[in-house]
Every structure is written in C-alpha cells, then in structure tokens.
Amino acid sequence: MSPKSITYKPNSIIYFKGDIADRIFILNNGKVSLNYINIETGQELHEFIKTGEFFGVKSALGRYPREETALVLLDSNVIAFTIDEFEQLVSKNTRVIIKMLKVFSNQLRRIHKQVQNLLYKDDQINSETGLYRIGLYYFKSKKYSQALYVFHRYLVYYPSGKYSEDVTTHIHTAEDYLQKYGQGKGPVVTINDTPQEVDKPQKSRELSGIGKEYYNGINLMGEEKYEEASEVFKKIIQSNVDEEYSLKSRFEIGKCLYYMNNYDHCIKMFTVLLQKYPKHPDLSEALFFIAQSHQKKGNNDRAVSIYRKVLSLTPETDSIYRRAMKELRELERK
C-alpha cells in the first residue's frame, strides 16, 4: 500500500479528540485547524496547520487517543500515512525528521507555557482558580478519578474558597458517574430506541449546525471578511440555541468591530460582555481590545489605565501580557 490522498470539504472533521490514533497526516493544500482545550483556563484554542506540515504524529506513534480535534476550514487535501508508511518515509528522509522536530518543539513550548502559568502564579487567588480549572478540565474530559483527586486537593487548600460549593457538587457528581459508568464514560439517554452517551462526539464527521456556522464565521475572519463574519455570529446569537457558541460569537463580533475600525461599538460590545460575564475566559483579551480601541480614538489616558489592568490580570508568559506591555511603554514615552 502507499499513502492515500484524501479531499475534505469545509467543516469536515479529519479526527475527533479521543479517537484511537492509527493515521498520520500531512496537509497538501487548504486550511486545517487543530482545536484543543487549554488545561489551565479551560478555553478552546486553535492551532492552524501549515501547508506541508505533519499532524497527528504523536498520538499515532504513541498509540494513544488524539489530544485535539482536526477541523477542516477550507477545501483541503491531505495525505494519510499508516504508521509503517510514515516510518519508512522518515527512515529515508532526514528533512522529514527535522520538520517533525520543529513541530514537536512548538508543542513542547506550548505545554511548557501552560505549566509555567500554573507553577509561577504569585497570588493566592490565581493559584486557587488554576487548581479549580484543572479539576474542571478533568471532569469535563470524563477523567473522574483525576478530577476527584484535584477537587479534594482544592478543598484541603481552600476549604472556604470561592469555588468550594461548585467543587463539592462536582465531587458528588464525579463519584456518582465513576460508580455508575466508570472512567471515561457518562450518563446515557435513549434516542430512537438506541442508547447514546451524553456529550460523546458522534462519528458522522460533521459538526452540528451551530458549530458549522460558528467556524464559517471564524473562516470569514481569517479571510478578513469581518462584516460577513459579524452577520454569521449575530445569527448564532439570535438563534438562542447554544449558550457556549452564543458566548463565543459575542466575543468574535467585538473583534470584528475592532478590525472594521468601529471602535465605539467595539468598546460597547466588550464592555457589555464583561459586565454580563465577569469571569469570561478571554477577559484579558477583551480588555486589550477595549484599550486598543481607546488608543485608536486618541483616548490615551484611558488606554493606559486599561493596559495596566490587563497586565495585573495576565501571566507574564502570556502573549496578551507582552502586547499590552509593548503598547503601554510606547504610550508612556509620549
């Protein structure tokens, strides 16, 4: 057998997080995003694959489930290798090895950054939040044993913490799920006389309608079609079907407004969003766009104040921290 060329339409899924890995891919043309969860913040992150870049290598070679979902954003063609085919290719081509080392180096830097953010938080509130979010990540991933360990540690260190009530509820739920369903599973419901596991991705290789619309909007933003993207996100919000995608869409509209130079509406959008969701996972980035909008309008004093707020809320290793620091220094020189 030889490597197989496969063509995907936009919004197709090459593989889901949790799939058993048996293929390695290289992007021949098009646009593919690897979507994964930041274990520190619980935020969904997107990593775009470059043309000629391999993906799905670690999980395939390590024989463990995929750590991310590979989503196709534009018409794309990929080359799929079996493990044996990939090993043969690597053994005959040192350039492939060098490419793989670069990919792994980027991934290691990403992981190192997350670990640093957890280990080097100076104030107690951030450490508490970090511990809570780790437990929540394991809980949502149905890794109930790990979630229970983290949540119990939380109650040891923060018995009267601001998340203690939620943690206690999650402990009871995790213990119940672990006893009833075991590790990695959740409650089931019956659909058309067929048991279906709740929250388990369906292997249809297609996203839900709202998911498709959202990523269509993200794709339009990538093409700098901000007005069209805004209309997509507005429809998602108006549909009132999925709270998570509605929240994400409000954030993306704010960004679109900024890139369309509509600074007043950008400020208003993000301000209303943060008033309604003061613990928004993208709080720092939202504040950064507010500061940028004030700066563009010439309200430098207001921008300086908000940039300082961003710095006080953001780890120094975060790119938003560095960007805010750069803008702040430039403004203070004036």
Image: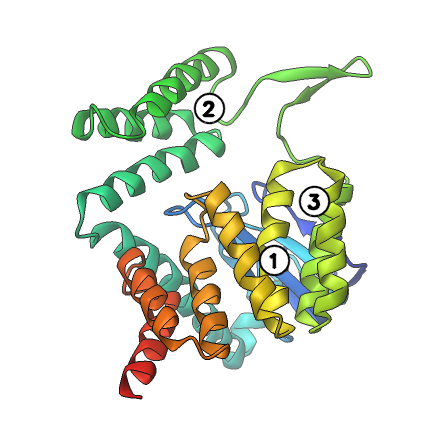
Q: Say the numbered circle drawn on residue 237.
A: 3
Where does the image place residue 272, in percent across and percent down from the top left? 53, 49
Q: Residue at x 18, y 43 (%)?
A: 124
Are dots 3 and 2 in contact, CB under 8 Å? no
Where does the image place residue 41, in percent across and percent down from the top left? 40, 47
Where does the image place residue 4, in percent across and percent down from the top left? 76, 62
Residue corresponding to mark 2 = 183
Are dots 2 and 1 in contact, CB under 8 Å? no
Of badges 2 and 1, the one in the foreground is: 1
Where does the image place residue 3, in percent across and percent down from the top left? 72, 64
Mark 3 and mark 2: Cα distance apart in space:
35 Å
Q: Residue at x 39, y 14 (%)?
A: 172
Left or right of 222, for residue 311: left
Q: Tag 2: residue type? A: Gln
Residue corresponding to mark 1 = 252
Mark 3 and mark 1: Cα distance apart in space:
11 Å
Of badges 3 and 2, the one in the foreground is: 3
Sequence order check, earlier mark of 3 and 2: 2
**SS at mark 2?**
loop
Which sits in the foreground, 63 or 173?
173
Sequence order check, earlier mark of 3 and 1: 3
> In the image, is residue 75 above or below residue 327?
above
Which sits in the foreground, 207 or 283?
283
> In the image, is residue 83 above or below residue 279?
below
